[in-house]
Amino acid sequence: MDALAPLLQLDFRPDLIREYLFNDVIVDGAWITLQVAVLAQLLGIFLGGLFALLRISRNPVLGVISGFYVWFFRGTPALLQLIILYIGLPTVIDDPSFTQELTAFRAAIIAFGINEGAYMTEIMRAGIVSVEHGQMDAARSLGMTQLQGMRRIVLPQAMRVVVPPTGNEFIAMLKNSSLAFTIGLVDLLGASRLIYSVNFRPMELLVVAAIWYLAMTTVFSLLQAELERVLAVGDRDRPQTLLSRAMDLMGQRHAR
Amino acid sequence: MTDPLVQVQGAYKRLGKTEVLRGISLDVARAETVVVIGVSGSGKTTLLRCINHLEVLDAGRIYVGGELVGYREVNGRLVEDREPEVARKRAAIGMVFQRFNLFPHLTALGNVTAGPRYVKGTPRDQADDLGRELLARVGLETKVDAYPSQLSGGQQQRVAIARALAMEPKLMLFDEPTSALDPELVGEVLEVMKALARDVHMTMIVVTHEIGFAREVANRVVFVDEGVVLEQGTPDEVFNHPKEDRTKSFLARIL
């Protein structure tokens, strides 16, 4: 027992977690993380949609451009791409206004967005390809153009296939955006590092950061489940969600 | 036959290395119901898809209502139309598919109103009124809000017919409309098609193996073999007195 005693003398102060959980620096950092993740994901979805359409177009040149984009941005680390953009490019583009406009915040959104676009291209392409050819035939036989058929008939169905992996991507984005602390962005992880470098309580502050990350990923997982239910309209085995179960319960109570 | 609605002239189509249509010609008059029969792989489906320009012809011409479908003729040469123009011509040709191809994310009413709303720009309430009327005509007035996954095969195919009719086509193409159905559901779909021929004198080209339907409704039966019309005539001529050996052996197998 005596041998274990030193191990059991833990130096961990839960009260610090409560004290720092809603600290201004931490809350601001969480807000930065959320903004970077949402904006980069939106950019990624936009680029993914664009390059997926290029890939499935019959034009071979467009297909090669799309293939190259996916090959490069999926084949190199996101961190490398971020540093190329933030550290590398300003030394090549010798223009003070470029350096000035390219804040760490913007660089993170652009780099993570372009990187995410490569993954979203594959996800979107898989979604579009999963819709039977007969759907486009039927749309065209009614007099729709290729573009109308895509928008009204194919894409709404592709979305069902696209949403689950996109939710995964977004959750990953929320966490991986913490890479941006390497270029000095004070996001959630950056904020906790900033504080523990002063108060020397890293463990408590890392737990604070972990709680925030978990809170955000939990909220978005629930939102994703709702979205999947909305898109599964017309499906035989439409999934139940927390909200839909709650609504059912309320409905039963009203019915009585 | 004066001024046929459909004129297929020497249509030639290759899919990969197979010659599917080998210079097929066929005229269909207004209000005529033509039943196309033939072994699988003889080019029946491809013929329908070419009339609708879902497939591009390699040679030959197809006119519907006096207009080339999918092409313009410039100094005796065919130039493929731009897409909006193809879509406009195609809108006047209804098509019903073997596997229904209903839009699974839309209700029965949503399927029927998709054409009028998205192609013609008909206001929603007006399109809905038309849609309800058409669904009632195919006997599905109680299924307006059902999704395709909640309907039987026969009901789905009837929705598909109503969906095509919503564009007020001058020609209807049926590609084996009952082949994917359970036997007990075939009748309800054929009834709807008979009513179309009888009551509104719709011009129809029907690819089918339903000989009973052909005998009752068809003005003409066309036997397609290896990408050409081998034999055609009234149902009585083709079914009871076939001239060609290949027609006889085909009929022997399906009758």
Image: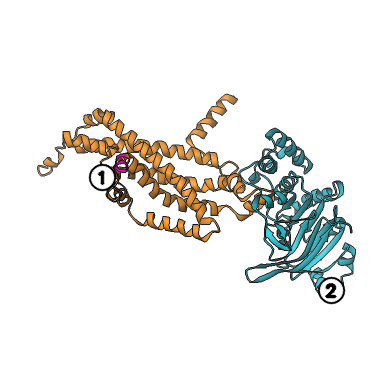
Verify whether residue A98 appears in magenta: yes
Q: Is residue B101 above or below residue A100?
A: below
Q: Residues within 10 Å of mark 2 (few under 14, many from 20)?
A: few
Residue A55 in the image: state x and y as whole percent: 50, 56
Q: Is residue B146 above or below residue B76?
A: above
**Considering the numbered disc 2 on the image, is that residue within a helix, a strand or a loop?**
loop
Tag 2: amino acid: Glu
Q: Which residues are magenta?
A: A96-100
| Chain that is coloured cyan in the picture | B
Residue at 87 percent of width and 58 percent of height: B219
Same chain check for tags 2 and 1: no
Gap in angstroms between the C-alphas marked 2 and 1: 82 Å
Q: What residue appears at the point 21 percent right and 34 percent down from the top-left corner? A: A195
Front residue of this view, candidates B53 and A8: B53
Query: What residue is disc 2 on?
Result: B244
Disc 1 target residue? A182
- Horizontal and vertical percent for residue B64? 78, 55
